[in-house]
Image (cartoon, helix red, strand yellow):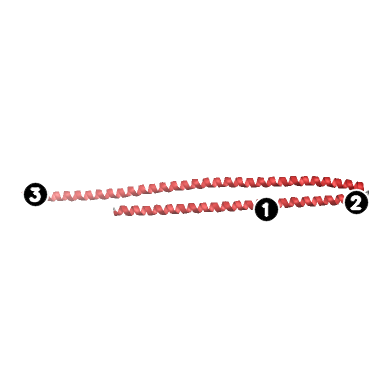
């Protein structure tokens, strides 16, 4: 009986030891798996936060840059338009002065013709010719000035639009490149972390 009891005790001890070892291995495996999951979750959260921060910063910077650029372009366009308006007003003022001077000259010529030449027909003809010349000159000057101003304004607007389009395209390309680089870095980092954890 003593031998049987010793054998039973030994077998029972071996079973207990084996159960303890199995439980310990299971616990270690569970702990390692949980640690890997926690590390991966933490890395993913950190990467997502970093990506969100980078995207927000890029969006804010681009928005500020676009706002400043639009404001500068608006000020430049307003300045160009105002300068053109002032130029047109100055030209119109000069034209008005020239018209007044021409009218005075016409009146003087008419008076001289009336004094020197008695014939009314000659006076009427001279006055008509001078008035016709005055009208033609004034109309030509006004047309030329308007055409020049319109051409200048159109050229300036086209240049501004082209510059804005080029800047916006460059900004969009830069943002896309930054986002792609960040995504590639994040994916490579996750792969490296997972490989290192599995190796460890």
Rendered image: mark on residue 14:
none
- Asked whether residue 99 appears in the rendered view, the answer is yes
Q: Position of residue 127 (x, y in %)?
A: 86, 49
Query: Mark 3 or mark 2, which has the lower sequence index?
Result: 3
Q: Secondary structure at mark 3?
A: helix
Q: Secondary structure at mark 2?
A: helix
Rendered image: mark on residue 6:
3
Q: Residue at x 33, y 49 (%)?
A: 37
Q: Which residue is mark 1?
A: 151
Q: CA distance from mark 1 to mark 3?
A: 114 Å
Whether residues under marks 2 and 1 lie with C-beta atoms below 8 angstroms apart, the answer is no
Q: Which residue is mark 2?
A: 122
Query: Which mark is in front, 3 or 2?
Result: 2
Please count the marks in the image.
Answer: 3
Q: Residue at x 39, y 49 (%)?
A: 47
Query: Mark 2 or mark 1, which has the lower sequence index?
Result: 2
Query: Mark 1 or mark 3, which has the lower sequence index?
Result: 3
């Amino acid at each position: 009986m003593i031998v049987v009891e010793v054998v039973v005790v030994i077998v029972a001890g071996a079973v207990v030891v084996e159960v303890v070892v199995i439980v310990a291995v299971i616990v270690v495996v569970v702990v390692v798996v949980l640690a890997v999951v926690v590390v991966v979750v933490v890395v993913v959260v950190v990467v997502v936060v970093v990506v969100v921060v980078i995207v927000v910063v890029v969006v804010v910077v681009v928005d500020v840059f676009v706002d400043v650029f639009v404001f500068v372009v608006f000020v430049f366009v307003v300045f160009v338009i105002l300068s053109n308006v002032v130029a047109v007003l100055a030209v119109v003022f000069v034209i008005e002065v020239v018209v007044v001077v021409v009218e005075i000259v016409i009146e003087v010529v008419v008076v001289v013709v009336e004094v020197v030449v008695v014939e009314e027909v000659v006076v009427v003809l001279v006055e008509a010719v001078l008035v016709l010349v005055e009208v033609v000159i004034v109309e030509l000057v006004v047309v030329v000035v308007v055409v020049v101003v319109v051409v200048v304004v159109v050229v300036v607007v086209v240049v501004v639009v082209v510059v804005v389009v080029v800047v916006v395209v460059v900004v969009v390309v830069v943002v896309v490149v930054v986002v792609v680089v960040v995504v590639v870095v994040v994916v490579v980092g996750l792969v490296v972390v997972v490989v290192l954890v599995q190796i460890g």
